[in-house]
Image (tube, grey):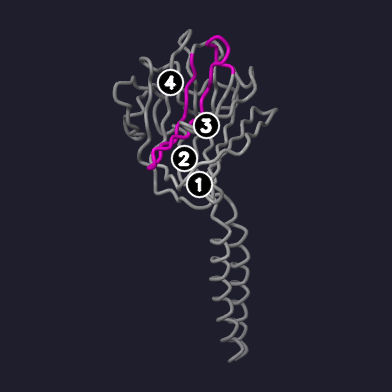
Amino acid sequence: MLQRNTILDFNFKVLATAAILSVSTVTQAKVIWSENFDSATAGQSVTAPPLNWSVVPGNGDVKVGASPHPGWQGNAIIGTLATSYPGGYVQTNLPTIPTTGALTLQFDGWAFSKYLDGGEVILNTNTGNIFRIDAWNNNGGIVNQWVIGLDGGARWFSPNNFMRDQTVHVSFNLDYANQNFWGVFDNGSSIITTPFMSFTGTPALTSLGVYEDKRWDSKGTDFDNFTISSVPEPEEWAMMLLGAGMVAFQVKRKHKQL
């Protein structure tokens, strides 16, 4: 009997510990989809296996190349390898992405200041809303800003002459619980956060697109290290905790009956 009680007591402690760990882990972002292009060969079209991205009809293809920037590793999307204006492709094989809680899209970008127009990353949705993150020209056609916005609605611009010819880590946040979105631009020394901007409904992400626009001196915008992550709503955390707690309670109850 003593041995059996010891085993049950051990099981209860294990389950209780698991319940506590579950609360701490579910509050962290879970990566749903990621792509760093390292599975492809430099110079390869992104439409070829294993990437299998889709070229936008009528646009030139964009190829994978060795990352040329400090701190970047492996391959990246290299704007200088776009074969025509504009080059673009879309990843349509995204997994099922929840429309509750919050989503975060992150990537690294490098916008050259000596070309006419900037590249962009877009998030297409099933409601027709299109969220955009652009390298933007607002200085006589020279790229000197980054911008996050919603087609047909609000846009927010970074300061002029900010984050060109250097790595920019973009974090775009889509908050379904509060129906707003905002972005963080981090160039290693400064972080700019937009005011909150709103959307309506629950637009589910259907595809992620990357585009190269007009180029000057054959330079485009480079992109790498894409991730889409989700964080559950507090109600989901509570349900997980409740479930783990009920299991632990049942084990403890059986322990007392023996």
Residue 186: assigned label: none
Residue 243 in the image: state x and y as whole percent: 53, 71
| Residue ID for mark 2 | 34
SS of the residue under disc 3:
strand
Mark 2, residues whose alpha carbon is within 10 Å: few (<14), some, or many (≥20)? some
Q: In the structure shown, which secondary structural element does the residue marked by tag 4 occupy?
A: strand
Q: Is 19 rendered above or below residue 156?
A: below
Stretch of the chain drawn in magenta: 117-144
Asked if residue 242 lies in the magenta stretch, the reply is: no
Quarter placement of the N terminus:
bottom right
Residue 132: x percent and y percent?
48, 31
Q: Return the disc, 4 or 1, that comes first in the chain's sequence.
A: 1
The quarter of the picture where residue 44 lies is top left
Residue 223 in percent (x, y) is at 49, 27
Callout 1: few (<14), some (14-19), or many (20+) C-alpha neighbours within 10 Å? some
Q: Amino acid at mark 1?
A: Val
Q: Which mark is residue 31?
A: 1
Q: Say which amino acid is labelled 2.
A: Ser
- Label 3 sits on residue: 149
Question: Residue lying farthest right?
Answer: 189
Kindly indicate the quadrant of the structure image that contains residue 143: top right
Q: CA distance from mark 4 to mark 1?
A: 26 Å
